[in-house]
Image (cartoon, grey):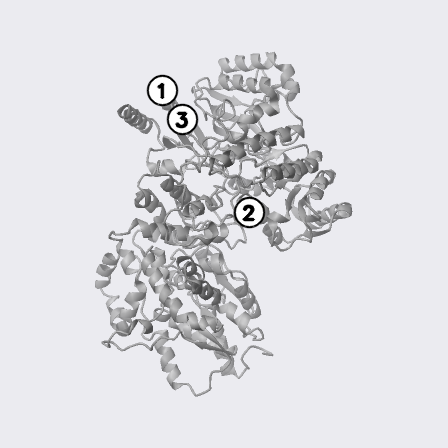
Amino acid sequence: MADRTESEQRDLAEELAAAVRGEVSFAAGDRALMTMDASNYRRVPRAVVAPRDAEDVAAALRVCRAHGVPVVPRGGGTSIAGQATGVGVVLDFTRHMRRIVSLDPAARTAVVQPGLVLDDLRAAAGRHGLTFGPDPSTHSRCTLGGMIGNNSCGSHSVAWGTTADHVRTLELLTYGGERVSAGRGADAQGAPTGLPPRLRDGVKALVDRELALLRTGYPDLPRRISGYALDALLPEAGTDLARALTGSEGTLGVLTEATVRLVETPAARVLAVLAYPDESAAAEAAHTLLPHRPMTVEGMAADLVAGASGLPEGGAWLFVEMGGESPAEATARAEALCRAAADGTTGHAVVTDPAGQRALWRIREDASGTATRMPDGSEAWPGWEDCAVPPARLGPYLRDFRALLTQYGLRGTPYGHFGDGCIHVRIDFDLLTPPGIRRFREFSGDLADLVVAHGGSLSGEHGDGQARAELLPRMYGPELVGLFGRFKDLFDPSAGLNPGMLVRPDRLDENLRFAPLPTGPVPVAFGYPDDDGDFSAAVRRCVGVAKCRNATLPTGSSDVMCPSFRATGEEQHSTRGRARLLHEMLAGEVITDGWRSPEVRDALDLCLSCKGCRSDCPVGVDMATYKAEFLHHHYAGRVRPAAHYSMGRLPEWLRAAAPAAPAFNALARTPLATVAKRLGGIAPERPIPRLATETLTRWWWRRRKTAAPGAAAGRTVVLWPDTFTNHLSPEVGRAAVRVLEAAGLRPLLPPTAPPRPAGAAPLPRRHRPLCCGLTYVSTGQLDRARAVMRRTVEVLAPLVRAGRPLVVLEPSCAAALRTDLPELLADDPRAAQLAASVKTFAEALEELAPDWRPPRLDRPVAGQTHCHQHAVLGDAADRRLRERAGLTGDLSGGCCGLAGNFGFERGHYDTSVACAEDQLLPSVRQSPPGTEILADGFSCRTQLDHLGDRPGRHLAEVLAEALDAQEEAGTPEGGEGG
């Protein structure tokens, strides 16, 4: 039997490869990437095909049909009900079939391919003052094909409706190879046009026989997405076959092209935020706002937005966007709405600033991820993500829904499209144990009955998939659901398209993605404090909303995630893709080598360890930590890549080379450098950095010997001499000392012995230089990292207990001390105390010298916030310090692409350059003359030196230079009036 299966698989692979011009893959890694979407479900495909055009789709269907293999069309993989998973051949449309075929501004239409990302269409239409109305929160990565398959909506549906309202024509291929051109209208006999004779006659006969059922069997509400929209085939509905096929989840035909309608977008938009005492009050009020013709009526309660700034005081809020021909008109309409709603609100705010609006909308758009973690850190899951009831029934429904949660001992955080009566919620189901799964099933049945009792739809946006299709008879009754089956059998008599969805569905408690994971904790090195030490739980954080698949960063965004995906466009190089591979590694079914997996290793190879996902992923996936963990296990007891020895142990090499720095610098400019780089696994394109001829620590001890007694005063801070500052850019450390002393602080270096001359006996261990362990962590040498970190903790513990702040100039080292160190030394309480003492340069000045006024520079800035600063440390203090110094403008997001050892490693150069070209280099090139280029990270400055024509400096250097200029000019330090 096994031989037969292998033979069938081989034949399928050979025939697909011969028939399809696009990529065909049976590789474990590629299949593993497609096992899940953004739902609770997991199905393992046999192969992944990326068709180049409709003819490729037809060829793939022909081969699959001959072998009896099912086919599942897939877009961005953000479906929440399981319909983008499949056991046969997955057609991945995001690789090639992602074009705008044509756009007609006069007709307000666009012809698109199924893999086109929504934001790409919106950007193209926006140049003509148009947009595509439906806008799911995943608009930056969801595809038009997926939206059509699910009949997606979005926050603007109160103004523009669902995707079905914007579909003109659909070009599809059935599993049997028949071509369908679905539109609106009937022929002379009343049959839908655009169908081959067999389908045309069959559809007409089905509709004619069931006119009464089609006219009475559907609830009347704006967000009725569940099931097939067969009532669109009624004569009085215009015999709209395109609308009937929209929302069919790839079960009837494979979309190859669509003509969609565009809408005019208002010239100005203003956001009115209405606060209410509680969720019920907001729900009751939502539908009363509709006569004011809002563009959105989005609701959320305090349990979702806890800690958010910019919201008026209340327990729940409605985000109501108003449009106008001018900002004044939009503002006037928003203010009028606030006055009309005032009696029921506890306050309101009218947000006219686009940046302020983006910040508030981000709360809403990230909710599909943030809601997966409860306030206490426990997990919550989709499954009942988007039920919809008539808007006027939303308040009573929500009260009953909350009561049902309480009855089952469950918790959830409702939010969503209150104006349309559609609620999103993630619920803390236990999907890991049989009793929990039984409760999930029982609750699902009771909730379906509750939704139906309120006249609602089981799905109001994301489709039924596997999550709800089993319960459709409770909503529609067996007769109409039977009609769905007959319609499916007309289009797909072989049941080859997306089986298990919508018609004859899999049970809602089958194929759960957690089932194959280990039932107990996996032995790991990091502590994973937010996941109770469970690596499986950490990997489960990724729910697939795929914010990491954004091809570009939003305008004005300081986000970082995910630079490698933006550089390559490959799923395996996204945070989600890597998390999926780790999930499958733990499952052991597709990826069978465990920690030795080459598939996971290759996917993680282009992870820059930027930590952007730690802050930008809505659920806080920390791929840099997962990568370090994987490399630790993968290379345990094995020879490592050369770069792990050369750059992973950089602190040791630099300490050894420091006494002979001039000689090493000279050798680095000879042909021997080429040999050294080859042996060290270093990219040949990279010059070897120059070593400082006088390290920061040597300068410090020399200066200390000549300092006048009592010259230093003020509060003592410990200045951390990180490896990069000490050996490669000591000028940054000297500048920081200058500024800290000018601010009235007394910087000291950690208590280690002064540097030794060349040839001197080695220092005792207790006197050797300290290290944060960063380079060991980034290369997965965690045992060695723990050793150096433990010594750092031991030496610094007395200073920490004495309340001495630890000022760290290099953001990546500060991040390692603040996060990696306590997570690797979870058994040592002193590690957490040390982490809490870490302060950035700006934080130290703000918190420890609050009255100090920096010198005024009054010039614009450009450059990039260090990715670790953004992700771990935060840059609020830096922004305030720059503002006080008269340094205006914002730094860009993204990652410089050098990222410590990453950009120096052989094979990474092209990706490193692509990452730099994403944000950093354009921001520098576009800055006017006289702009100060800021780059606090050594990697960022090095990348600018290698690739740019304008060097970057640490903020400490800029301020120190200004202080020196003031001193020469005779101006008091601290700026005017300081």
Instruction: Please state the horizontal and vertical placement of residue 74, each as a whole percent of the image.
Output: 45, 33
Cβ–Cβ under 8 Å for marks 2 and 3: no
Give the position of the C terminus as an image quadrant: bottom right
Choose mark 1 or mark 2, whichever is in front.
Answer: 2
Q: What element carries label 1?
A: helix
Residue 944 visible in the snapshot: yes
- In the picture, the disc for residue 374 is 2
- Distance in Å between CA atoms under marks 1 and 2: 48 Å
Q: Earlier in the sequence, mark 2 or mark 3?
A: 3
Label 3 Cα neighbours within 10 Å, binned few <14 / some 14-19 / many ≥20: some
Label 1 CA crowd tier, 10 Å (few <14, some 14–19, many 20+): few
Could you tell me which quadrant the N terminus lies in? top left
Front in this rendered view, residue 789 or 874 = 789
Disc 3 target residue: 55
Mark 1 vs 3: CB contact within 8 A = no
As helix, strand or loop, the secondary structure at mark 2 comes to: loop
Q: Foreground residue, 639 or 919?
A: 639
| Secondary structure type for disc 3 | helix
Q: What amino acid type is highlighted by mark number 3?
A: Glu
Q: Earlier in the sequence, mark 1 or mark 2?
A: 1
Q: Where is residue 236 in the image (x, y as percent from the top left)?
A: 66, 19
Sooner in the amino-acid sequence: mark 1 or mark 3: 3
Q: Calculate the distance from the C-alpha at mark 1 to the C-alpha at mark 3.
A: 17 Å
Q: Mark 1 points at which residue?
A: 66
Where is residue 911 drawn, in percent x and y? Answer: 37, 51
Q: Quick check: 776 above or below 274?
A: below
Q: Nearer the viewer, residue 917 or 531?
A: 531
**236 with respect to 99 (left or right):** right
Where's residue 205, x and y in %?
56, 12
